Image: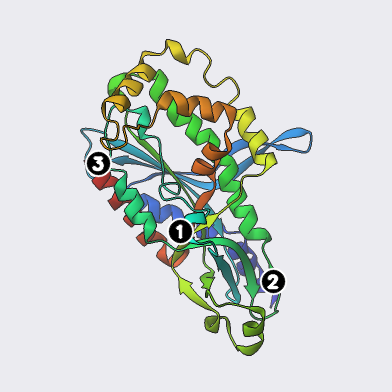
Amino acid sequence: MKDSKKWKSRLLSSSIPLEYEVAKILSDLDFSVSFDYSYFRKDGERRKEFSTDIKGYFLFPIDSEDKIDASLTLLTECKYRDESKKWVFLPDVNKPDFSTFTLGHTIKSLAEFSLKKIEKDLIYEFEEKLDFALKGVEINITSGEVFDKDIRHGISQLKYALPYLIKRDIESNIWGHLVDTNPPYIISILVTNAELYILDDDFSISKIREVDNIEQLAKKVPYLVYNSEIGPDFTEHHKEIFKDFTLNFEEKENLSQFENFQKKHKHKEYSIYNSPVNKCWELENSHYSTLKEFYSQHFICSFEHYPKLVNEIIGVLSKMTK
């Protein structure tokens, strides 16, 4: 490559152009957009500031300036890749009853911290149609290099930022004016210009040796849901953020109102409900099941299909908040 063109390649590789195009898409969809959402994370023995590329904030209903029914915070991490690179993922190998994926954990709802009843079945129906992946690698078709560092790093950036957003939305509704409380939703998306593939169920070592290209081993997908395991480092990170979270909460009238509302609208058949009081306690104690609920599932999306995915999510949440 001539020196005069190196700057183009390096500018693209910085992901700044990709970030800008993603931000424009969100702005066109009426999101309020900001760059480099910062948060603290332990790095060795010290706390260090990290960031995710883009934070978008959206208010429902669509096209209304007179009222607010719900909010959506969308975190996006951007990874620009050379054209020769493809992202390839393992499908969920578990039988349905043993799957690590749970419907309703990718679109994260905190609706129990409000006085509004939502149709959460719409989230389940949407997520049921998605492809799920357990692990991914980046393959450079030209050089033959295979590694997973950038995929794991991108997911990690999103995952470690989420507790701050969840804590913010809960505290905002508990400490704010009751009439202003609305269901908050949070979503994390890793977006890349690389093509995404999920390997076929009959993928094997012997089949790799038989085929000529990746298309003979996998199907191309526009986006998928990626599973990220909850490890001890993240658990400690979460405990630090939610330390003393429930202190003085028993004095807050809003939390009592939310609890009573959820009891009143408990499931008719099973007599269960989402308890905001219990949820606060579970977050403070960093229960494994609660960490899986909020932090184990993330979207990975090709840039080409990013507008479609975000539009579909907005459509689902719009129906839920009517």
| Mark 2 neighbour density, 10 Å: few (under 14) some (14–19) many (20 or more) | some
Which dot marks residue 146? 2
Q: Which residue is mark 1?
A: 21
Q: Answer yes or no: do the residues labelled 1 and 3 have beta carbons within 8 Å?
A: no
Quadrant of the rendering where the C terminus is positioned: top left
Q: CA distance from mark 2 to mark 1?
A: 27 Å
Residue 134 to residue 280: above or below: below
The spot of residue 145 in percent (x, y) is 71, 74
Residue at disc 2, secondary structure: strand
Of label 3 and label 2, which has the lower sequence position? 3
Q: Residue at x 46, y 15 (%)?
A: 249
The amino acid marked with disc number 2 is Val
Residue tagged by mark 3? 61
Snapshot quadrant of residue 275: top left
> Residue at coordinates 50% horizontally, 30% vertically from top-left?
167
Q: Can residue 171 be seen by looking at this rendering? A: no
Which numbered disc covers residue 95? none
**Residue 227 placement, left or right of 144:** left
Residue in front for this viewpoint, 35 or 129: 129
Q: Count residues near mark 1 (Cα–Cα under 10 Å), then give few for <14, some for 14-19, many for 20+.
A: few
Horizontal placement of 282 versus 317: left or right? right
Q: Amino acid at mark 1?
A: Glu
Which amino acid, mark 3?
Pro
Residues at circles 2 and 1 in contact by the CB criterion of under 8 Å: no
